[in-house]
Amino acid sequence: MTEAWTLWFTGLHGAGKSTIANKLAEILRKNNIKAVILDGDELRKAVSSDLGYSLKERNEHMKRVANICKIISENGAITIASVASPTEKSRQYAKKILKRVLLVYVKCSLETCKKRDVKGHYKKSEKMESGFEHFKHGSLNYEEPKNPDIVLNTEIESADESVTKLITKLKEMGII
């Protein structure tokens, strides 16, 4: 069995990673392509509930996600990892252990992400809720990817436009 690709979505919380990932997975599945979504926030509850949002803890969470992606891709399904992955170090780890990874930068300004705050992370940070003491600091220190394979700018693109752009890239690369 050929190892499948991992689509590693990185970007600030609220940038649109999960929205795009879900729309993409739906299209792939309709075309009989096995796709598994790994949402960083959901994985936090399941495999990283012992971690907070300090930089060290965020990097550890990304290691765990990358290792899960490796297992899934080795079993022939496209993995869509929708994670903040705030540091170059965490993204390099994923690239190191995954044979086939496409880095998807879901770009959006911090101001817009705070307005969206779909999952309430920024509000929890402002209230200094347990586990979110370092969240705001981590978001402000998000390291933009140096060489993403594709940039989806949700500041100016709709989710559907971003998905279409991504599907075009996947076809060009022969991933789908």
Image: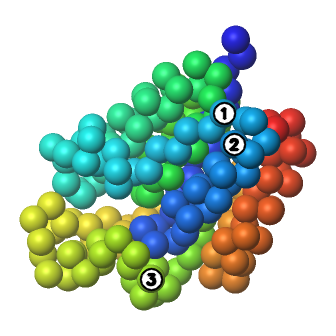
Compute the Cα span from label 1 to label 3: 30 Å
Mark before the other along the chain sequence, 1 or 3: 1
Q: Is residue 128 visible?
A: yes
Quarter of the rendering containing residue 171: top right
Q: Secondary structure at mark 2?
A: helix
Q: Nearer the viewer, residue 121 or 91?
A: 121
Compute the Cα span from label 3 to label 2: 28 Å
Q: Please, what is the three-letter code of the amino acid marked with disc 2? A: Arg
Mark before the other along the chain sequence, 3 or 2: 2
The residue identified by callout 1 is: 34
Q: Is residue 90 above or below residue 158?
A: above
Quarter of the rendering containing residue 80: top right
Which residue sits at x=53%, y=56%? 10
Residue 38 horizontal side relative to residue 4, left or right: left
Q: Are marks 3 and 2 in contact (CB under 8 Å)?
A: no
The residue identified by callout 3 is: 116
Q: Is residue 87 above or below residue 96?
A: below
The residue identified by callout 2 is: 29
Which residue sits at x=35%, y=34%? 64
Q: Is residue 48 above or below residue 139?
A: above
The 10 Å Cα crowd at callout 3, few under 14, some 14 to 19, many 20 or more, is some
Residue 17 horizontal side relative to residue 49, left or right: right
Quarter of the rendering containing residue 131: bottom left
Work out which quarter of the rendered image holds the C terminus and state it.
top right
Q: Is residue 110 visible?
A: no
Q: Please, what is the three-letter code of the amino acid marked with disc 3? A: Arg
Give the foreground label among 3 and 2: 2
The 10 Å Cα crowd at callout 2, few under 14, some 14 to 19, many 20 or more, is few
